[in-house]
Amino acid sequence: MIITREFKQYLCKKVESLADLGLVAVALVALLGFSFGSLFDSFVSNRPSPTPTAPTPGATPTPVAVSEAEKKNFKDIENGYLLILEKEPDNTEALEGLVEMRSQMVRIGLKQPQDLIDPLEKLVRLNPNQTRYNLMLAQNLQQVGRGEVAEQTYRQILATQPGNMDALQEYVTFLIKQQRPVAATELLQTTLQNAPEANNVQPNSINVAAVKLLLGQVYVSQKQFDQALSLYDALIVSDSKDFRPVFAKAILLKEQGKTKEAGILFNSAIKLAPDQYKDRIQAVAATPSTSAPSVNSPSSPSPSKASTTAPSP
């Protein structure tokens, strides 16, 4: 079979036909909707809230109900990408499409995380400098019980990009799930110790405030609330215009039952935050508290360039 432009256009139309289901992402995104909470996470790494495509590492996704016709569409699109790859095995666009489609098929119970490993490994091989492929591979390796390989992947990324917040967040989340909070704390503290030299060589390569916010979330996850509050207070003093530590402290106080103090801070965070965060912060403030925030609670971005979620390391 010859893979024609018309056939590729046909695949695009098939993908578009599923977009209304809310299942197909517009493109491959940083699949980081993991434990710390998407709102908080985007605050930390200055990226928009992740589009759900791959399951949270270690979690068992609840299949999304779709009709048989819709399932057939998914399978048809997957087969279309496979046909392209038979003729063009190194076609990056087809590999990305296959990964995206199978990620959605995992969500509806038609595929397993293992089915994503092979195309992701090929993407990593073809694009060794594309960090997002490595991160996606690491996520799915965790899903299939290959945590040691996933950890090696995180370490490899951070060896050359110590300030990569996506890698730091995912690796820290991995360590917390592995019951290794000391390792998570040491990783972040070492990153902060190395930040002055790294930023001298490459300015702004390590976002110190973001790393500290992530460290604060680790403290919170381990119920080390005094350390977290001290860290948030120091961040607030160092930059009175940064809404992230204010928001982080508000969340912690709210979960501790200090609603009055939390309310004051939530209001302050709303005033300081960029417009795209105000409604979300208000929603968090209005949500009934449950228990002290864990590493599965929100993270955060740069005050001026914030891109999505609540404060996070």
Image: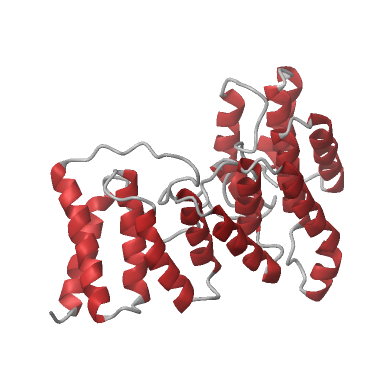
Q: Residue 76 location, x and y as percent?
A: 17, 59
For image coordinates 18% across by 54% down, the residue present is: 73
Q: Residue 184 location, x and y as percent?
A: 72, 48
Q: Which is nearer the eye, 268 or 160?
A: 160
Q: Is residue 156 above or below residue 76?
A: below
Q: Is residue 161 left or right of residue 288?
A: right
For image coordinates 57% across by 40% down, the residue present is: 37
Tell me if residue 18 can be seen: yes
For image coordinates 79% across by 36% down, the residue present is: 228
Q: Residue 243 location, x and y as percent?
A: 71, 42
Q: Is residue 228 left or right of residue 129?
A: right
Q: Is residue 4 left or right of residue 143?
A: left
Q: Which is nearer the eye, 42 or 100?
A: 100
Q: Is residue 308 left or right of residue 168?
A: left
Q: Residue 108 location, x and y as percent?
A: 29, 43
For residue 203, what is the image quadrant? bottom right
Which quadrant of the figure contains the N terminus?
Answer: bottom left
Colouring style: secondary structure
Q: Is residue 282 above or below residue 86?
A: above
Tell me if residue 242 can be seen: no
Q: Which is nearer the eye, 220 or 110?
A: 110
For image coordinates 86% across by 42% down, the residue present is: 234
